[in-house]
Image (cartoon, coloured by chain):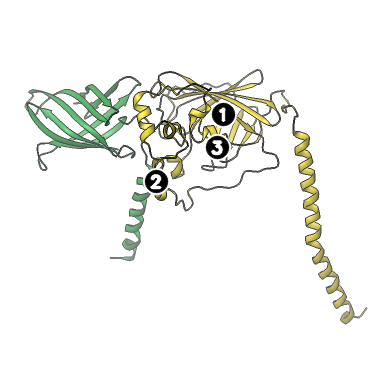
Amino acid sequence: MTRARRVFLPCLLACFTIVMHVSAQEGHPLKGTWLGDWGPNKTARHQVTIVFDWDGKNITGLINPGARAIPIQKASLEPNGWLVHFEADAKDTTGKAVHYVVDGKIENLGLYKRSIAGTWSHDGVKDDFKITRQ
Amino acid sequence: MNARLTSPLLAAVAVAGLAMVPLLTAAGQDEEGRARAKGTAKAKGKPAPRTAEGKVDFSGIWSPDRNFIYDIHDALKKGEELPLQPWAEKLARERMSKDDPEAACLPTGVPRQAPYPWRIIQTRTHVFLLFEGNIHSYRQIFMDGRRHPADPNPTWYGDSVGRWEGDTLIVDSVGFNGKFWFDFAGHPHTEQLHVIERYRRPDFDRLDYEITIEDAGAYTKPFTLYGHSSYQHDEELMEYICNENNKDVAHIVGKDPRNVYFKKK
C-alpha cells in the first residue's frame, strides 16, 4: 500500500464515523428521501426511491419520483412500534395494473440514516423490502 | 561615574523595580475590581438603557435560562402541557441524548439555549445574538422592515425579522430546518416551525421574553414559553469551540433525566 493510501483510508473511515455521529434523527420520522429495494429473494430485487412528506396531518409521497412516479396512497405511521403502512397503484413491466401494499417498521429511529424494513405485497405475493433514509 | 560602579547600581534599581511590578499590578487590579464592583452595584435597580433613537437598548451579555435548556415544559405557564402530536411525544420519549445534535456540536436552533452566556448587539438595522456556545455562532435579526423570503432555505437559525411595539422587540422567524431539538428532552419540530419572540427589558438587569411556537407539523396548537435572563456585569464571552476534540458523544448513555418524561415514567 502506498503512503498516500495508508493515510487516505483511515481518514476516509474517520470521516464516515464522524458523519454517522453527527447525523441524528430530525423532524417527522418519515420525512425525506429513502433508497432501497424490494423483491422475492436476495438476488431478484427492484431498486426503489421513495420520497415521503408530512404536512402535519397527512403523509404523502412518491415512489420513484420522475416521469413514471407512483403516488403513495393511504400512508400512515403508528408511533407505537413505529409501524409504517402505505399502498400504491402501479403498472408492471407488461403494463398490467398492480396494487402494492407495503407494511414495515422503522429501525434505528435515532439515526438520520434510519431504515424501514418489512413486506411489499402485490398479486397475492408477499415480498420483502428495506429502504434507508438518505 | 565609573561604569564599574553604575552597573551594579542600575541593576539593583532594575531588580527593585521589577519586584514592585506585581505589587503595582495587584493594586491596580484591586482598584479596577473595586471600581467594577461599584459600577455593578450602581447598575442594580437602574432603568433599562436607551439608544440615541430612544429605543430600549438590549445590548449586553445575558445569562441562559435553564428552562430553555433541559425541558421546555418548564417554561410553560403552570398547569399547561405541551400540545404534542402523538408521534412527536413518542419520539421525545424515545430520543436518547447521544443522538442530540447539540451533543455533536451542532447549533441549538431556536428557541433552545445552551448553558453558556450570550450577547445582544443592537444597531438600527440589525440585532445580533452572539453565542459563546454550544458553537461559537450567531443569529441575525433584520430590523430594516424587510419581509421573509417567499421560500427560504431551511437553516438552523431560520430567517428572522424584527420590529418594535413600544418598548417590546418582536422577532418573527421562519425557514428553520428540522434538524435541531428544542431541548435536552428531545422535543421535536418540523420545517413548518414559526417562532414569534417578544423581548422586554423592564430594568437594567432583567431581560424578559415570551416565545410563541407555531408548528402544525408536530404540535396540535400554538403554545407560549416564558423566560428571563440576567445581565452579566463585567463579563465577556469566552472562545468556546465545542467540536475541538469533542469526546462526549461516545460516552453519553441513556436520556438526560431533567425532563417531564422521567418524572411521569
- Seen from the viewer's position, the closer of residues B46 and B161 is B46
What colour has chain A?
green
Task: Please tell me which residue is depicted at 12% across the width and 29% down the height of the picture.
Answer: A121
Letter of the chain in yellow: B
Residue assigned mark 2: B253
Residues beneath discs 1 and 3 located on the same chain: yes
Foreground tag (2 vs 1)? 2
Q: Is residue A66 visible?
A: no
Q: Spatial distance from mark 1 to mark 3, Cα to Cα? A: 10 Å
- Seen from the viewer's position, the closer of residues B186 and A89 is B186
Which image quadrant for residue B128? top right
Q: Which mark is residue B141?
A: 1
Foreground tag (3 vs 2)? 2
B265 vs B172: above or below:
below
Q: Secondary structure at mark 1?
A: strand
Task: Please tell me which residue is depicted at 35% across the width and 30% down the height of the picture.
Answer: B90
Residue assigned mark 3: B138
B28 vs B212: above or below:
below
Q: Residues within 10 Å of mark 2 (few under 14, many from 20)?
A: few
Q: Residues within 10 Å of mark 3 (few under 14, many from 20)?
A: some
Picture quarter with the N terminus of chain A: bottom left
Identify residue type, mark 1.
Answer: Ile
Residues beneath discs 3 and 2 located on the same chain: yes
Identify residue type, mark 3.
Answer: Tyr
Picture quarter with the C terminus of chain A: top left
